[in-house]
């Protein structure tokens, strides 16, 4: 496996378009079942894609893959989570 200069991530894992879609949905927190429903594929196919993704990016579990998606992959932080200081902070009102 080739490793990039920064962070020890694979230099160019060459994920397919479908693998990028699966990885993006995984990073958003969807389960295998929900990923399958969103992409109109079986759960087994999702698992096969995840196995291929893990191998290509050097991940051993979902959290590593999700972080890869955010920092190096299809979601590319900070574009995936834009900073918007004008948004008000979440406030919770006590029950009545």
Image: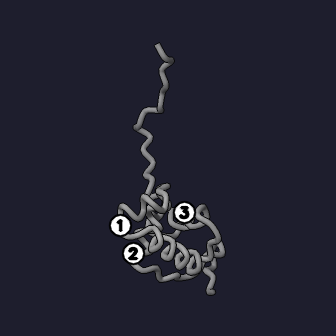
Quarter holding the N terminus?
bottom right
Horizontal and vertical percent position of residue 82: 43, 52
Toward the left, the furthest residue is 40
39 or 76, which is in the foreground? 39
Mark 2: few, some, or many residues within 10 Å (few <14, many ≥20)? Answer: few
- The part of the image, by quadrant, that contains residue 7 is bottom right
- In primary-sequence order, the first of circles 1 and 2 is 2
Marks 1/2: CA–CA distance = 9 Å
Horizontal and vertical percent position of residue 46: 46, 70
83 or 39, which is in the foreground? 39
34 or 81, which is in the foreground? 34
- Residue occupying the point 49% across, 25% down: 92
Question: Where is mark 3, residue-wise?
Answer: 66
* Label 1–label 2 contact, CB within 8 A: yes
Q: Is residue 84 above or below residue 25?
A: above
As helix, strand or loop, the secondary structure at mark 2 comes to helix
Horizontal and vertical percent position of residue 62: 58, 64
* Label 1–label 3 contact, CB within 8 A: no
Mark 1: few, some, or many residues within 10 Å (few <14, many ≥20)? Answer: few
Q: Is residue 43 above or below residue 86?
A: below
Question: Where is mark 2, residue-wise?
Answer: 18
Question: Where is mark 1, residue-wise?
Answer: 39
Mark 3: few, some, or many residues within 10 Å (few <14, many ≥20)? Answer: many
- Residue occupying the point 43% across, 32% down: 88
Query: From the viewer's perspective, is the residue at label 1 or at label 2 nearer?
Result: 1
Colour convention of the picture: one colour
Marks 1/3: CA–CA distance = 18 Å
- In primary-sequence order, the first of circles 1 and 3 is 1
Relative placement, left or right, of 58 versus 31 is: right
As helix, strand or loop, the secondary structure at mark 1 comes to helix
């Amino acid at each position: 496996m080739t490793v990039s200069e920064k962070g020890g991530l694979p230099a160019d894992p060459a994920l397919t378009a479908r693998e990028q879609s699966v990885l993006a949905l995984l990073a958003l927190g969807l389960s295998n079942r929900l990923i399958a429903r969103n992409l109109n594929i079986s759960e087994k196919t999702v698992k096969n894609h995840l196995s291929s993704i893990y191998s290509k990016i050097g991940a051993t579990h979902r959290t590593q893959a999700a972080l890869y998606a955010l920092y190096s992959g299809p979601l590319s932080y900070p574009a995936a989570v834009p900073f918007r200081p004008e948004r008000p902070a979440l406030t919770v009102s006590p029950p009545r």
